[in-house]
Amino acid sequence: MAGNREKFEQAMRDAYDHSWNQNWEAAIEAYKQALVESPTDLAATLGLGGAFLEMGQPQVALKVFERAVQVAPEDTSALAKLADVQERLGRPEDAAATQFRTGNAFVQQGKLEEAADAWAHALRLAPDQAETHLQLAQVLEQLDRSEQAAAEYVNLAIIAQRQGDVDLAIEHCQQALRLDPDTSQAQTMFESLQTARQPEAIDLEFWDELESEPDRSEPTDEDVFSFESLTREAEETDGHSPMELSQRRALQELAETLFEAGADGSPDLATVAIIGQAIDQQTRGIVDDAIENYRKVLKSGLTRTAVFFNLGTLYYERIRYDDAVEAFRRSMRDEAYTLGSHYALGLTYRAAGNIDRSLEHFLELVKMVDVETVRPDQVEGLTATYQQLSDKHIAKGDTEKANIFTTTLLEFFSAPNWEGRAREVRRRMDSLSETGDLMTLAEYLEAPETEVIVSAMALTGEYVRRNMLMTAAEECFRAIQKAPSYLPLHVRLGDIFLKQEHTQEAVTKYLVVSDVYQMRGDSQQAINIYQRVLRLAPMDVKVRAKLIDLLIIRGEVEQALEQYLTLADVHYQLAQVDQSLEKYNEALRLASSSADENAWKVNVLHRIGDIYNQRVDWAQATMAYESIVALSSDDERAQLALVDLYFKQGENEKALESLDSLLGTYQSTGKTQQVLTVLREAVQTRPEEMGLRARLAAAFARQGMASEAIAEYDALGEMQLEAGLREEAARTIQTIISLRPDDIEGYRRLYSQIKGGGL
């Protein structure tokens, strides 16, 4: 030590007292005095920086913390404080770089969890740092957190793809799939990248017109998809709807039984004759007689699905809707007739005036068709969306809108080649989507202005690709006038605003769309829009608060908690520390509803404890860390923090108890090296604390490091003698003698002198 030891210690005690009383000016002077006596003391340097920060002088604090990192380049506390002040000063790139260094320092100490936290924080500040993503992925893999590691490799793949390195992007996708074979994002991206290696297929339907008119600079309606073009290509047949197709199937199936007469397991000859009569009567329009004969077939014990379906169609024709419903419900159980039965039930309920039940079956029909057009990994999400659509329509009870919707559905399924049209619609919907959101066939058909919408979406997309943004906006405005209720058009307009760099107009448009989705009861779409807005304006606390409210209403507690933590971080970055603490406490309350309650509470409490520590509110920080230990007794970070906090508050016995508990945790988990690391750091910070020296000396002895143990015991003995603790000093000398030092006789004489009262 360069200066006067006693003056240094007095200055540090004064600094702690002033900090406790939040007298920051006096604390600064005291820390400065301490640094005069010991210019490289880390605790004094960090304390000075913290005091300047509390005084609202972050630029000065920055210089102090930079000095602290110079003094101790690998000290994680110094690095963390430097990163914090850099972040507060709006220097996210610098803060991210410092957090990266912090992670590396933690790795050197064997603290992989802490390293992962530091690198994750760095990526929140600078998301495109490939090296940080790679380091984080590797350490997460070491921690057996495979899903999170896979997510980092996906992020690396996205960065590589953006940089044009397809081979590297594919390699990262393969790493992600190795760790988590079920990650759909990696699988989808991998397939997409593999496809990208191949020559891009040419959309002949679109480019034919361009080739015939090479001078044309703007796309027209002829360039885009229309139902009429598909209709012309379809083969004309007498029956097109699912109901008609199922009826054909039923008649064909029953006709085949006529040729099975007499075979084993076939109906008896009398029943076969009745079936023949029923088929003949049904095809000739003799409805009542056909119904009677089909009923006789059922009474004979032949309960084939084809009979029920044919009966249902005949009952429907005779306006016997209750009987028709019962028959179609029976036929719906057979997978081969499910599609046709849903269509028939939709028609029957609609004719009977029960629009809600009609819509329920029509939506189920559309879902069954739509599910066949998407990839397997999209089926679950699509099914959930249809359930939301069904709940929304039934809850609203808007008869007029439901009638319009069902009419559109009937027109779609009555047209030729509706199955081919459904596949083409899916292709177009997917090609028009720029966000990856999965649009449903039902949503597509819901608007009666479908042709206007499809043309507008295709045209505006093409205009945007050609960078004709004004023209794209004008086309979007025209389409919105014709189909104002179709919200994806409004979203497209917001996208155009964004490409024009009119960010505020885009955000305003997105928020209006989100409000409308909420009024319509479609909370998932509202959530999607809020997430889009937050990608543009991550510091918008109002939007994030709305997103949290929606997630809580939907019962998505885990996502709501993640957003709470982000919101609290944003408040902290805006120097709104009280609001940050408020949001952390709200998250703490919500965590009680989580399936992983304790883990969330520990996470939140660590953040609360860090803030109180930085504010030198040691009592509140202590409460936070004590709560963590109560929830997770082996939480090393919390135990270590408590040791420091108890010492700062003069509760040395509690500090040593917590230290012993922490050391016991290390011993039980085989982290013997950590025992020495922690004790060395503690002694370096508080060299006059005899309890710490005694524990460090004992740890050296247990590790067989006799010379180091003797040196520590020697220093401890001197301190005990200076404090008048003769008996304790004598026991310390005895311990040294048991370690057989080089000057063993000298220590024996010293022991005798102490016991004899000579010293």
Image: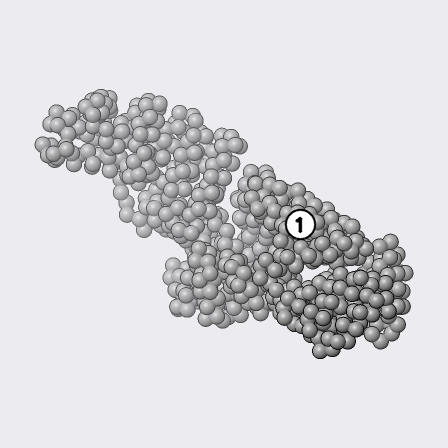
Residue at the spot 24% in from the left edge and 38% down from the top edge: 249
Residue in the picture at 40% in, 61% down: 203
Question: In the picture shown, does residue 199 fall above or below 538?
Answer: below
Classify the position of the N terminus by image quarter.
bottom right
What amino acid does circle 1 point to?
Ile
Secondary structure beneath dot 1 equals helix
* Residue 140: % across, % down: 54, 61
**Residue shown at 45% from the left, 71% from the top:** 167
Depth check: give the residue in front, 237 or 43. Answer: 43
Instruction: Report the side of 347 relative to 589 (left or right).
Output: left
Residue 73, horizontal then vertical, whole percent: 71, 72
For residue 569, what is the image quadrant?
Answer: bottom right
10 Å neighbourhood of mark 1: few (<14), some, or many (≥20)?
many
> Where, quadrant-wise, is the C terminus in this rendering?
bottom right
- The reply, left or right, for residue 400 in relation to residue 211 is right
Q: How is the image coloured?
A: one colour
Direction from residue 438 to residue 11 in the image, left or right: right
Q: Which residue is denoted by mark 1 in the rendering?
A: 628
Residue sitting at 53 percent across and 48 percent down? 488
Residue at the extreme left of the image, as rendered: 262
Estimate the x, y position of residue 270 in percent, counting from the top left: 12, 25
Asked if residue 130 lies left or right of residue 656, the reply is: left
- In this rendering, does residue 430 appear at all? yes
Q: Position of residue 425 (x, y in %)?
A: 41, 49
Q: Can I make out residue 32 in this image?
A: no
Question: So how many labels did they put on this image?
Answer: 1
Is 265 or 41 nearer to us in this picture? 41
Front one among 349 and 189: 189
In this view, the residue in front, 440 or 211, is 440
